[in-house]
Amino acid sequence: MNTEVNLEGSIAQSPYAGRGAQMFPHLTALQIARLEPHGRKITTHKGQILAEPGDRLPMYVILSGSLEIIQPTLSGETLIVVHTQGSFSGDVGTLRGISSVVRMRVREAGEVLAIDDAHLRAIVQTDSELSELFMRAFILRRVALMTSGSSDVILLGSARSGGTLRLQQFFTRNSYPYVNLDIDADASVRELLERFHVKVEDLPVVVCRGSIVLKNPSNEEVAANLGMNQQIDDDRIRDVIVVGAGPAGLAAAVYAASEGLDVLVLETGTPGGQAGSSSKIENYLGFPTGISGLALAARALIQAQKFGAEIRTAYSVLSLSCDQQPYSIEFANGHAARARAIVIATGAEYRQLSLENAPRFLDMGIYYAATSTEARRCGSGEAIVVGGGNSAGQAAVYLSGSCKMVHLLVRAAGLAATMSQYLIRRIDEVPNISLHVQTEITALEGHDQLTRVTWKTAGKDSETHDIGHVFLMMGALPCTGWLNSCIALNEKGFVRTGSDLRGEDLTASNWMSGRKPEFFETSIPGIFAVGDVRCGSVKRVAAAVGEGSACIQQVHRILSE
């Protein structure tokens, strides 16, 4: 019997709904036979609930009978699909072993084969045919849910709220389905506020599964309530901990896990790093039509999980303890994780404007990313992009598709020294991008929301414009504050590695090894740095991926000592 696909409600409008055969493929008898040694058979009964959102559950292969996959909502439920004989449940969360985002109910009694996340990862690592089938289906299912606009996780907020944008970014970059309701645009929000006994001043509010109400929660609080992370085993000593889930960190995780190392990846914010904030990357090898930073990071994250790397997101790293081995990563919650080697891949952040009131407008008119989440706030008005690198150029091009005018401000006399030629040509040809060279923002105005910007161009009078959206993509500040002064840094705060280490750096750290530091190794043996956080690195996605992957060869050498 073939899988009966029933894409109903809003999910039917997903751009991926036409790929139902790939989302919900039918396993052959031979494929099921290969799976049977990895699972246990369970008899099911009509109406039985196998899982609710928030439950950790295995992948189920339907041997007989049928299962309904349902998306609960505040007003009821939406049927996503009916799995029949030969079909299987699950999505990327199943592979990771974290909480489900759907309800699973038995429609017709029968029998299923339950395969837990550990056995599922073993299958995708050893069976290439099933790996491709499962991975494609899992990815498409989660993307379809993300684009469906249907979920029992509701974000009640306002386009005038910085906290709302932060949570939108958090859900989107973690590929977690949610419904966004704006109090200024949707009358139902006020009804929901009354229903859940919250006030307007409590916004943003996250309603989890119709019962848990979180008022202006932190990212960590949301992740904990939605079961987005498994508990870390404090007593387990891993081969390597990778701190940072940008391109460099994820590349390190993929190669380390695929080569059999026990890997833990810690991301204090959201996966993707600076690359995740890019609307499109067009010069990354292998993607001739380009790929968004979000999509690239999501694929890399799943790839790392496929090979067995453990991922923790929104996990606040407090400090690095490097005075004895195994090294320890201390968390804000009082727990710690230990490993024989550490890879620092925390990247860098864009510089802020050196104006006293600039922090007041963070996410309230000043943004450090240019994806659809931030672009929606601009609407069809005007926007300013500050920076002369590829990220700034790509942001200007992207925003020009919806904004009336995009002003690109750079301090230099031109773009040739810092931006790829293909982007320079594109900017020249887009009529609603205005390039302002030797120009800096000198003043910001507004109450709660940015409303006016003043800039000064060399040799000209200052100009003030009624523009309320500024995208900052200039320079980089390394994310090294958590290193607790135990790693040698250069004068700008980037991590020194290999030949950039000075004699005094090694003396200060009591370097006792009879060898020289490896190319990516820091002043502490067995601790490495890759990507944008490293002194002398090339600030490009491809370079970060290359460093992350190449570093693992050096990790192997250190672990074998």
Image (cartoon, rainbow, N blue to C red):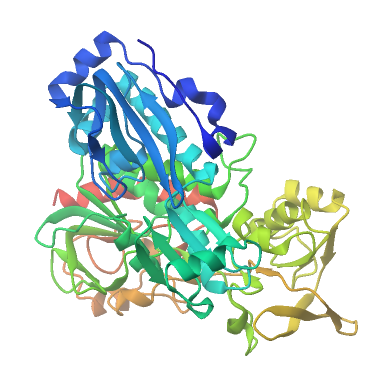
Q: Which residue is painted at 39% across and 73% down in the image?
A: 480
Left or right: where 281 falls relative to 559: right
Q: Which residue is painted at 61% across and 46% down in the image?
A: 281
Res 34 quadrant in image: top left
Q: Nearer the viewer, residue 309 or 436?
A: 309
Question: Does residue 496 appear anywhere in the picture?
Answer: no
Q: Nearer the viewer, residue 226 or 156?
A: 156
Q: Where residue 72 sits in the image (x, y, percent)?
A: 40, 45
Looking at the image, is 529 positioned above or below residue 82? below
Res 24 quadrant in image: top left
Looking at the image, is 348 positioned above or below residue 115? below
Q: Which of 407 and 402 is in front in this view?
A: 402
How many numbered marks are there? 0
Q: Which residue is painted at 54% across and 43% down in the image?
A: 147
Question: Does residue 74 appear anywhere in the picture?
Answer: yes
Looking at the image, is 149 positioned above or below residue 141? below
State the residue lying farthest toward the left. 235
Q: Which of 361 and 524 is in front in this view?
A: 361
Quarter occupied by the N terminus? top left
Q: Where residue 380 sits in the image (x, y, percent)?
A: 79, 59
Res 377 quadrant in image: bottom right
Left or right: where 45 falls relative to 398: left
Q: Where residue 506 sits in the image (x, y, percent)?
A: 27, 73
Looking at the image, is 236 positioned above or below residue 129? below
